[in-house]
Amino acid sequence: MVKRLLFLGIFFLVGCLIFGAEYRIGAVFAVTGPASWLGDPEKKTVEMLEEEINSQGGINGIPIRVIVEDTKGDETQTVNAVRKLITRDRVLAIIGPSRSGTTLAVIPIVEKYKVPLVSCAAAEAIVKPVKKWVFKTPQTDRFAVEKIYQYMKKKGIKRIGIITGTTGFGAQGRKHLLALAPKYGIEIVADETYAPQDTDMTPQLLRIKAKNPQAIVNWSIVPGQAIVPRNMKELGMNIPLFQSHGFGNIKYVKAAGEAAEGIIFPAGRLLVADLLPDTHPQKKVLMEYKRKYESRYQEPVSTFGGHAYDAFWLIVNALKAVGPDRAKIRDYIENTKNFVGTGGIFNFSPEDHNGLDIEAFEMLTVKNGKFTLLGD
Amino acid sequence: MRKELKGLVIFFGLIFLFPLLVKSPYYIGVLVFWGIYSIITLGLTILMGYAGQISLGQAGFFAVGAYTSGILTTRFGLPPWLGILAGLGLSLLLSLFLALPSLKLKGHYLAMATLGFGEIVHVVLNAWVGVTGGPSGFGEIPALSFLGWKLDSEMSFFYFTWGWVFLFFLFSLSLLKSPYGRALRSLHAEERIPLSLGVNVYFYKVFAFLWAAFYASFAGSLYAHFMTFLSPSSFTLILSILLVLMIVVGGLGNLWGALLGAGILTFLPEILRTFEDFEMLIYGTFLILVMIFLPKGLVSLRRGKVATGD
Amino acid sequence: MNWQNFLQLVLSGITIGSIYAFIGIGFNIIYNTTSIINFAQGEFVMLGGLILYSFHQSFHIPLIPAILLTLILVTLIGIGMERLTLHPVKNPTVLNMIIITIGCSIFLKGVALSIWGREVYHLPFFFPRPPFRIGGASITTQSLVVWVALIISSAFLYFFYRFTLLGKAMRACSVNPVAARLMGIKVKSLITLSFALAAFLGGLAGVTITPISLMDYQRGSLLALKGFAAAVLGGLGKEFGAILAGMALGITESLVAGYISSGYKDAVSLLILLFILFVRPGGIMGSKEEISLREL
């Protein structure tokens, strides 16, 4: 606590001393509250990168300052935080928010004040239709669904049951799961949901079981994605379980215990960085981020921190190239091509403010308590 | 009455001058939320502070107001005024349904019933995806306009909101000064006393319930048109509890307390946000200390000056 | 759906319900001496789970001593909370005390956040063996652990309140604190004792349910909401009421999710709860006269 306060104090003083001679970037993450599993690694990532850049002399000799605001995952708080960053701190660009709901809530504000925002949330609605000032780095949830369906099609899985959490993340996944199934000739025979506080999904799973599907897709956040596999195991359901890219943290595998074995899910390549061939274009970036993050924070890296990593570099690269001008930064990001990030290789355009395609995903599975490439 | 008028003029004078002195849209934006929460607490303090009934479901009425006018204007293109009126109508109807059987309940049982109502609203917002947009919510709610003046800036919305806060304050004040208000106040004491004075306790309790729901619903509509985006995560039990905290921290059964409490608890998270992980420690300690040292709320610091209430 | 599925739904409903009931009886203890609802009850549950995790998984203390240490620690936290926050207040109103417990709840969550962070923790089942099979339905060993702990706790409370002087004195405190004091009962000490007991039972609930429900710093209050519902529905202050109501809630949720709609299961069970409250304003086991004696 003392260390923290001291750090804040020094930070503040330094900030005051060099007031005017720094590039300010805002960051709004759900550092506490129900979505803090997203916001915490994101915050740690940008703080690490900020320090790294400043220790190398900043951008063109001018230090950067990332102002992190905690949104608690709450929309009112996020709106206040973004308004503060834009009008009081006069940041050049904003990283975040962490959740899709909070991102959608602040879009009117950044559009009005013309500030580039690179969101760390997955929902397709953020960039479709394209909003002039809004970008996002996580792979779109639609592609995660398509990746799963492609795999199912290859394996001849035609009848599935889906079970989703009643959170923004779960609801978006459900929407895409339902909408895309016909395209891949898949029939959804059961469609169940559960609330975030539920402790037992046995009733829902029984309903699914009664319809006798070939596989189950569970789209949710913790702890649902640990409880569903455990309940399935208790019920003796041995059909394959697919989960969302929200499973991208090795801690969740530990929480699910033995039941996690064999879960299949799409994710960016960060989780399996060391298994990639050296020739893979992302290998270097992924290994570097993983090494720095894990040695600094003594905890495994997650894909969510990776989204903040990508967002940070998109903005900083733009800042390096065009200087402190919000409109020019926006234009630069929109025209960024072949940017190698943790989430994939980004190619932005005026029609595409996410810049990733389905190839950003890899199908992973859990084997002996570790993530591994699923292969064929 | 004199003193109160003076207080009113000074307070609202300062509020209305604020945007001219402090031009920051950030502070003006936070003050808009203060105004919105104040409208709810001004209603809730009538229910809790005077009629002595507890409600842990106020977020439900807030949500009904927000979603009704949000959905009607966005999906069906109705003018916002109709949307707000529809929200008020629906809230009054729902609160009547809830109030009639609920007010036989007392204390914690009433708290549980109102809490149950709030939670049901929340579940419906999540599950009725076709209409409410489900957990992902929906956006692009049109801005309000007032006498041909489009309220799309923080500043214009600020004046609009605080204008209503002022009116609602006057409504509540004149209610309390009227014979109805005196009857309402007597409810707070033992139920047998007003009964023996010939006061229809049941009628007044239902009346206070509707009054509070009306305020909450109106505030909800303002919230919808200010945020222009709604999702169920803004309307949880946490908000209902926060609203109760506001009026108790400010000073129960005191209109100034309702305003003050809403203000303090709107600004506190803004001040504490930089503390991140420690915010909860400070916030919790603040609540405990206020309750230990100022059990009658923050207004008791200046009891002599403001005399509204009992 | 066949009867085998029905049995499974009922069994998992009982498991869910026993979690609610276990948390619910914690509310009753403090209600019995103070007439207040302790909003920090869920935090006792959360602390039970997380502290046991640290003792058992991080410090590798064997399970039984780790559980004992956890319960002692949670009990001390309960005592500390009461002594530091509620004890110093002179002539508190019920609402004041409730707000103080809300403050404590937020504070304890903050403490847990700074110690355990945001992760979701899980504990292994106490008896790691495959689920039992009854008539084609399965039931895990941990559910049985929760049931046994719940039954022992409530039996203990029943005897404590009915047959010991201390227990009777505690009940007297809430019905009429002034009269109780006149009778020579040390009301304040008994309130401290009730927090100790409630924290102990909350901790025990946390210890036994964490292997099923998992635990993180904010999960306690989510679970406590349902526990509160069970306590109120059963009739505040009635241990068996809470158990009955908790089971009823759990089984209703399970059956609604299994046969009608999982999206609306919480709404349906809450509607049933409201209906029961309207019919029986004092809860299933409560009497009207008793409520009218109480303050709030």
Image: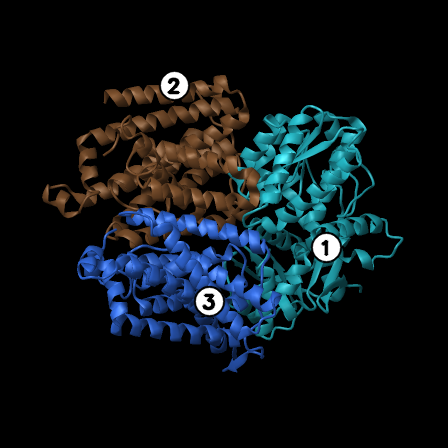
Chain colours: A cyan, B brown, C blue
Residue at left offset 51%, top offset 20%: B22
Residue at label 3? C71
Left/right placement of residue A349 relative to residue C220 reads right
Q: Nearer the viewer, residue C65 or B249?
A: C65
Residue at label 1? A267
Whole-number angstrom distance, CA of label 1 to CA of label 3: 41 Å
Name which residue type carries label 1.
Ala
Whole-number angstrom distance, CA of label 2 to CA of label 3: 56 Å
Percent across and percent down for residue B33 are 46, 32
Percent across and percent down for residue B120 are 41, 52
Name which residue type carries label 3.
Leu
Q: Nearer the viewer, residue B135 or C96?
A: C96
Q: Chain of mark 1?
A: A
Please say if C59 is above or below B4: below
Q: Nearer the viewer, residue A168 or A211?
A: A168
Whole-number angstrom distance, CA of label 2 to CA of label 1: 56 Å
Structural crowding at the residue carrying mark 3, measured as other residues with C-alpha within 10 Å and reported as few (<14), some (14–19) or many (≥20)? many
Say which of marks 2 and 1 sits in front: 2
Q: Chain of mark 2?
A: B
Say which of marks 1 and 3 sits in front: 3
Give the quarter of the image for residue C173.
bottom left
In contact (CB < 8 Å): disc 1 and disc 3: no
Residue at label 2? B13
